[in-house]
Image (cartoon, rainbow, N blue to C red):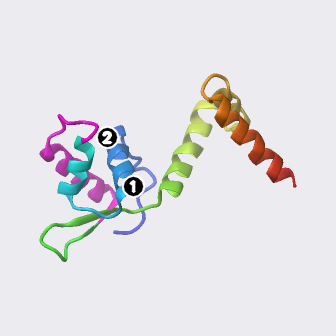
Amino acid sequence: MSKPDPSSKPTSAELDVLQVLWRIGPSSVKRVHQTMQVTRPDIPYANVLRIMQVMHSKGLLTRDESERSHVYAPAESQKATQGTLLRELIHKAFAGSGKALILAALHGHVSREERKEIENLLREDEL
C-alpha cells in the first residue's frame, strides 16, 4: 500500500490502534488486541480485526502477508499523522491561526511543569 489517502483521516478507534502500533511496532491483530485489553478489557478481538482491516483498506496501515499471522504497521509515522491532524484542526477550529491554537492550549490545558518546558524550549530557540 502507498501513502494514506488524505481524505482517509483516522477515526477515534483507529487512532487508538495507531497509538498501540506506534508504541509496540509492527504487530499481529492478536498482539494489538492483547495490548488494547490492558486499558479496555471489554474490546472484542473481532472489533480490533475489523478496525485494522478497514484501516488497511483506507491506506492507514500496511500489511505483511508473508507469515501465517499478518503483521500490520502504520503507513505513516506518528509525527506525520499528528502533523496532518494538527494542520486540519488549526484550519477548521482556529481559522488557520497556530497562535490561536497555542493560546487555547495554554489556557487551562497545560500543567505548570509543561509550561516551564515550553518556556525553556522557546528560550533555546531564540539562541
* First to last magenta residue range: 38-62
**Closer to us: 39 or 3:** 39
Q: Give the mark nearer the N terminus: 1 vs 2.
A: 2
Q: Identify which residue is drawn at 41% across, 57% down.
A: 5
Q: Farthest residue to the front: give it.
A: 113
Q: Amino acid at mark 1?
A: Arg
Q: Residue furthest right?
A: 127
Q: Residues within 10 Å of mark 1 (few under 14, many from 20)?
A: few
Q: Which mark is residue 23?
A: 1
Q: Quadrant of the C terminus?
A: bottom right
Residue 75 on the magenta segment: no
Kindly identify which residue carries mark 2.
13
Q: Residue at x 15, y 67 (%)?
A: 69
User: Residue 12 location, x and y as percent?
Assistant: 36, 38
Q: Where on the picture, by quarter, is residue 29?
A: bottom left
- Residue at the image point whose x is 44% and y is 61% from the top: 76
Q: CA distance from mark 1 to mark 2?
A: 16 Å
State the residue in front, 99 or 32: 32
The label on residue 52 is: none
Quick check: 119 left or right of 110?
A: right
Label 2: state its secondary structure.
helix
Give the structural element (helix, strand or loop) at label 1: helix
Image position of 87 (left or right of 121)? left
Q: Residues within 10 Å of mark 2 (few under 14, many from 20)?
A: few
